[in-house]
């Protein structure tokens, strides 16, 4: 087990190194750098911009710049943001709680709704109901969040005034759980609706298969009521693969949700990353992307190790992941 | 007044003084009986400003983003500022230096500022001339990433004869200095907090400390900047407002929602497409901020096709300025033919006008050897007349303009394609000359520095006699002569068509009718936030 774990950890490290190099190189591809956000201003001069470029070390070869970044990164220093004049770690970590709140709530909502709809769709004999549920799920998946978000904002924040018009909280009013929940509601539903479809399908397919199993028929024959059958016998078994998939989804929570964050003025990582890319703020972009990469690699590593621990037959030379 | 004067004279004087006294008493009573407009400003309250952008830093001079500089204006003062009529107003200076009061030397090489007394930094330290000298040193420090040093870098020496006087010496006459000092690049930094420190990493980037009317209480990244009143502001009784909240709302849906719910007192940078919407709201009005900027097309004068003046003139005739101004720009601006906008005093209203005339454009192209070709696209020596228009992504209005122009040029045989890139990619692309036509805006200082022509010169205009006019204008102290030279240059440029001016650029804001005192100036929207009050 230890050898397996050691090998997997080394592989994870190597993967992260390659990812970081690729990301760094890809970020350099579009023309323009951090100093060019000034260059179009009417009072800028080419000399001043060139001097800034030199001061920020942007005229050195790309691999040298990468080396500098890497050296700082492995010692825990994420670098400094060119736009925000403060450490990248501060800028990024400041947004993590808001992001996790939004994406976590959206995941919880979509899971809840997905399980509910999937169960209904699998349990019912009624073709119409099945069709409706599937249609709802597909609609949720197809409607772009900038459209559904704008509609929610218009309907509930402007006309009905049931919800606030964006932001995380009422500014200057002190902490209030109710206020926070109200602000969270709109973006959660909008973002979650996109993922409801996939959970619905998983649950429905998984349940449909489980419901065909012998032990279900036996339980039914023994007089177990249908609802108890579903909830106590079928669903838990159908949920096992779901748990694995959800586990691997969790790192994605850190990616934020750029469009939803923009529509609802939510201060999350999605907006930070986009702003970083649009201003060529390489340290910030690397910071957010590498944080995401580390989370994904760690989640995969944890899953690998968990599998091996549960089933020692799993070998090193398994199928490529 | 001496009592022992001859009787007649004494009586005359007494009458006059009685009249003045009565007048003063009357004037003191007037506010009570004047029209309702002359309301006394109400103290207190909070103004909410909605902005699509977020400031990047609140320490002046390190960033050129408009919103950064606007919010800095709430916390910092400059020696001067510009009011809504484009006139200089004294801030940290006790008075505006002029030739008449000796503040500006007649040869334009020496500027002397007498500083206002009793001004304190927001931590209580007195403001002195050394702060101004320190600011100049920071701006011209080659080891600091300052994006713009123009005009400041021409100062050859700074003298401090006493703690309340600063004198700037220039080697050559410089007429742009007052404009620079009054603008966003004129804020004064606190020497006692920053000297010898690392300015780039300073916490003043996030929690600035100036002499201005407001203090930053909190800056929640991505969400808002919360400012509160500076109780020790140097102008007594100001600011009227207790708080200003700058809310960062990046999406138009959220901005509109804030206006519809009446949660905003001011929205900055309203897109033209939203003007009709704002006008439909009873509580808000659209206010255009005056600016010295304009929209235009850069032409690459070294491009093989555009090298020919006839082609450039044809493009000018093919441009429906009036049409674009009245449709895409919602009729908010007139068409522009000169290289400076009408708001600027150096604008030349008499330059050659290229009327929208596709037929004439076609004639000019024929003359230039571009004859009708297959598919309706002209060609010369087997090559089609294909042009690429570079556009910056992000604003629907820009794309609309470029699409209208593309369709217009197609009418007389030009195959124009639009290439869209994002903002940071624009300067290097232009700098390397990897473009033919590019759409964007440019601006001028209150006292022109002609950076478009003498700076990066992306259009690669090499008419030396014309550029010499500009250099002379920069060296001439007499304003009348400068105006003459600037006008001559604009006339020449209208003949040569190195760029295609389109229309003045105005920044639109939505202001609540409850917000009083809001009067944007070329120095931005927040220059007089200390005078704002809410009904």
Image (cartoon, coloured by chain):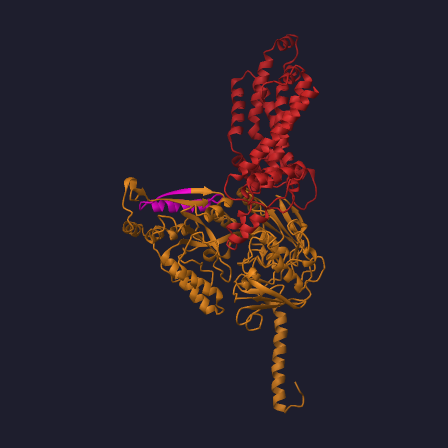
Chain colours: A red, B orange
Which residue is situated farthest in the right direction here? B124
Q: Between residue A64 and residue A309, name the one nearer to us.
A: A64
Q: Viewed as shown, does residue B21 lie left or right of B452? A: right
- Where does residue B361 sit, x and y in percent of width and height? 31, 51
Please say whether residue B39 is one of the residues in the magenta stretch: no
Magenta segment: B392-418
Q: Which quadrant of the rendered structure holds the C terminus of chain B? A: bottom right
Q: Which quadrant of the rendered structure holds the N terminus of chain B? A: bottom right
Which residue is situated farthest in the bottom direction here? B6
User: Residue at the spot x=61%, y=72% of the render?
Assistant: B27
- Where does residue A67 sit, x and y in percent of width and height? 61, 38
Image height of B389 relative to B107, above or below = above
User: Residue at the spot x=38%, y=61% of the render?
Assistant: B491
Please say whether residue B399 is one of the residues in the magenta stretch: yes
- Whether residue A197 is visible, yes or no, is yes
Quadrant in the rendering for residue A98: top right
């Amino acid at each position: 087990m230890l050898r397996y774990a050691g090998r997997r950890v080394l592989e994870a490290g190597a993967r992260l190194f390659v990812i970081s190099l690729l990301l760094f190189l890809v970020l350099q591809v579009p023309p323009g750098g951090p100093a060019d956000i000034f260059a179009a201003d009417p009072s800028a001069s080419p000399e001043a911009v060139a001097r800034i470029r030199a001061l920020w070390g942007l005229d050195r070869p790309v691999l040298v710049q990468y080396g500098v970044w890497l050296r700082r990164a492995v010692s825990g220093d994420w670098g400094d943001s060119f736009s925000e004049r403060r450490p990248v770690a501060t800028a990024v970590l400041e947004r993590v709680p808001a992001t996790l709140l939004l994406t976590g709530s959206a995941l919880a909502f979509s899971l809840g709704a997905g399980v509910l709809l999937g169960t209904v769709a699998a349990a019912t004999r009624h073709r119409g109901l099945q069709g409706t549920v599937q249609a709802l799920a597909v609609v949720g998946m197809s409607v772009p969040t900038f459209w559904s978000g704008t509609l929610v904002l218009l309907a509930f924040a402007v006309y009905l005034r049931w919800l606030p018009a964006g932001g995380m909280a009422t500014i200057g009013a002190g902490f209030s759980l109710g206020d926070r929940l109200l602000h969270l509601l709109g973006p959660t539903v909008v973002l979650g609706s996109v993922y409801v479809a996939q959970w619905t399908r998983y649950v429905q397919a998984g349940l449909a298969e489980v419901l065909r199993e012998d032990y279900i028929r036996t339980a039914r024959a023994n007089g177990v009521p249908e609802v108890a059958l579903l909830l106590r016998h079928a669903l838990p078994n159908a949920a096992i693969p779901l748990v694995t998939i959800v586990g691997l989804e969790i790192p994605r929570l850190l990616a934020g949700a750029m469009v939803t964050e923009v529509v609802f003025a939510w201060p999350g990582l999605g907006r930070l990353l986009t702003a970083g890319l649009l201003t060529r703020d390489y340290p910030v972009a690397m910071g957010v992307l590498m944080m995401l990469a580390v989370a994904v690699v760690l989640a995969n590593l944890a899953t690998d190790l968990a599998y091996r621990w549960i089933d020692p037959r799993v070998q090193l030379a398994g199928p490529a992941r | 007044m001496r009592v022992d004067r001859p009787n007649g004279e004494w009586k005359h004087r007494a009458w006059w003084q009685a009249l003045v006294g009565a007048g003063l008493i009357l004037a003191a009573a007037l506010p009570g009986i004047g029209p309702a407009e002359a309301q006394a400003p109400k103290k207190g309250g909070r103004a909410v400003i909605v902005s699509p952008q977020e400031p990047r830093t609140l320490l002046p001079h390190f960033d050129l983003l408009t919103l950064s500089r606007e919010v800095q204006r709430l916390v910092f003062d400059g020696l001067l500022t510009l009011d809504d009529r484009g006139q200089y107003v004294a801030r940290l200076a006790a008075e505006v230096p002029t030739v008449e009061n000796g503040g500006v030397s007649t040869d334009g090489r020496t500027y002397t500022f007498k500083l206002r007394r009793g001004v304190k930094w927001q931590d209580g330290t007195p403001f002195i001339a050394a702060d101004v000298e320190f600011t100049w040193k920071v701006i011209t420090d080659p080891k600091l990433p300052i994006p713009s040093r123009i005009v400041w870098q021409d100062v050859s020496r700074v003298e401090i004869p006493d703690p309340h006087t600063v004198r700037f010496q220039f080697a050559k006459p410089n007429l742009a200095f007052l404009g620079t000092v009054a603008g966003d690049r004129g804020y004064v930094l606190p020497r006692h907090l920053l000297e010898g420190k690392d300015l780039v990493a300073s916490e003043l980037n996030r929690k600035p400390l100036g002499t201005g009317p407001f203090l930053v209480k909190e800056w929640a990244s991505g969400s808002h900047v919360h400012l509160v009143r500076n109780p020790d502001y140097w102008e007594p009784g100001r600011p009227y407002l207790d708080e200003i909240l700058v809310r960062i709302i990046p999406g138009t849906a959220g901005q509109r929602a804030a206006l519809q719910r009446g949660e905003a007192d001011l929205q900055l940078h309203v897109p033209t497409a939203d003007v009709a919407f704002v006008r439909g709201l009873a509580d808000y009005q659209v206010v255009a901020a005056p600016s010295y900027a304009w929209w235009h097309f850069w032409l690459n004068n070294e491009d093989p096709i555009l090298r020919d003046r006839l082609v450039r003139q044809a493009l000018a005739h093919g441009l429906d300025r009036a049409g674009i101004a009245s449709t895409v720009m919602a009729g908010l601006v007139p068409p522009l033919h000169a290289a400076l906008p009408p708001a600027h005093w150096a604008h030349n209203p008499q330059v050659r006008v290229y009327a929208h005339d596709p037929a004439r454009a076609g004639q000019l192209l024929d003359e230039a050897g571009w004859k009708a070709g297959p598919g309706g696209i002209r060609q010369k020596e087997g090559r089609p007349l294909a042009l690429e228009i570079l556009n910056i992504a992000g604003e629907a209005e820009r794309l609309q303009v470029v699409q209208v122009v593309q369709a217009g040029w197609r009418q007389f045989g030009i195959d124009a394609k639009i290439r869209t890139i994002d903002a940071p990619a624009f300067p290097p692309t232009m700098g390397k000359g990897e473009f033919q036509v590019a759409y964007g805006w440019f601006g001028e200082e209150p006292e022109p520095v002609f950076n478009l022509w003498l700076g990066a010169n992306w259009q690669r205009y090499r008419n030396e006699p014309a550029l010499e006019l500009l250099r002379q204008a920069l060296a001439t102290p007499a304003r009348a002569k400068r105006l003459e030279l600037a006008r001559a240059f604009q006339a020449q440029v209208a003949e040569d068509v190195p760029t295609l001016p389109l229309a003045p650029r105005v920044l639109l804001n939505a202001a609540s009718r409850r917000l009083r005192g809001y009067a944007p100036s070329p120095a931005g929207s927040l220059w007089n936030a200390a005078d704002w009050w809410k009904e």
